[in-house]
Amino acid sequence: GEDVEQSLFLSVREGDSSVINCTYTDSSSTYLYWYKQEPGAGLQLLTYIFSNMDMKQDQRLTVLLNKKDKHLSLRIADTQTGDSAIYFCAETPGGGADGLTFGKGTHLIIQP
Amino acid sequence: NAGVTQTPKFQVLKTGQSMTLQCAQDMNHNSMYWYRQDPGMGLRLIYYSASEGTTDKGEVPNGYNVSRLNKREFSLRLESAAPSQTSVYFCASLRDRAPQPQHFGDGTRLSIL
């Protein structure tokens, strides 16, 4: 069955880089997403990557995909207090209109 | 720009009561989704509607029914609420298919006593 795994917590110092990791099991996954959830809010799409790509960069965000190991990571450069949130990795097998399969989310904690 | 609107934002029910959660989107999206979010569990898909007139079960459909009233609206009904259904419920919509992202509402926080 489909499964997406993430560490529950990550603590980093303000100004450092944050690296949030995710592993997935469905080899048919076509698109992989990173969503951000701030307290009391819905989910905000950060970025996504197609399964035939290795890397995608968007300003402070870098996504790396190792398809062989089914490992996805999100790097946030120069982490700020506003980056404090829960980050969800999600996949959409087959790339259709079926629902997303989410990981349990990683709480990013920023230390001053 | 409203996007995905969910009502109500908060609700407290007694065990056995019924309730309908409303969701509407104004982006002319074809697909709509209901998820529940529980602490430490991430989001799990309850039901979805890939297009107007169709609905399909997701990972955790038991205890719920849905209605795709028209292209804009997708409602979630709890016929006989149970404490295990205490959760935050999110509605989402998608224009057509991946990689277009799903757009999420702000959630409905539901407590069943």
Image (cartoon, coloured by chain):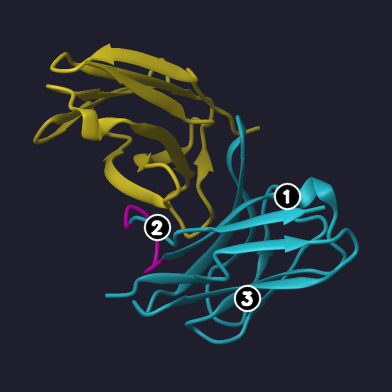
Q: Where is residue A74 in the image (x, y as percent from the top left)?
A: 28, 26
Q: Nearer the viewer, residue B2 or B103?
A: B2
Label 1 lies in what chain? B
Q: Is residue B96 magenta?
A: yes
Q: Which of marks 3 and 2 is in front?
A: 2
Q: Disc 2 vs disc 1: which is toward the camera?
A: 1
* Image-quadrant location for residue B15: bottom right
**What residue appears at the point 37 percent right and 55 percent down from the top-left corner?**
B98
Q: Which of marks 2 and 1 is nearer the N terminus?
A: 1
Q: Chain A is drawn in which colour?
A: yellow
Q: Which of pointers 3 and 1 indicates the residue nearer the eye?
A: 1
Colour seen for chain B? cyan
Is B2 drawn above or below residue B40 in the view shown? below
Dot 2 falls on a residue whose secondary structure is loop
Write down the quadrant of residue A38 in the picture: top left
| Labelled disc at residue B54 | 3
| First of labels 3, 2 by sequence position | 3
Pointer 3 local density, CA inside 10 Å: few below 14, some 14–19, many at least 20: few
Q: As drawn, is B13 to the left or to the right of A80?
A: right
User: Residue beneath label 2, please?
Assistant: B102
Stretch of the chain drawn in magenta = B94-100
Q: Which amino acid does label 2 sit on?
A: Gln
Q: Which residue was labeled with disc 1?
A: B86
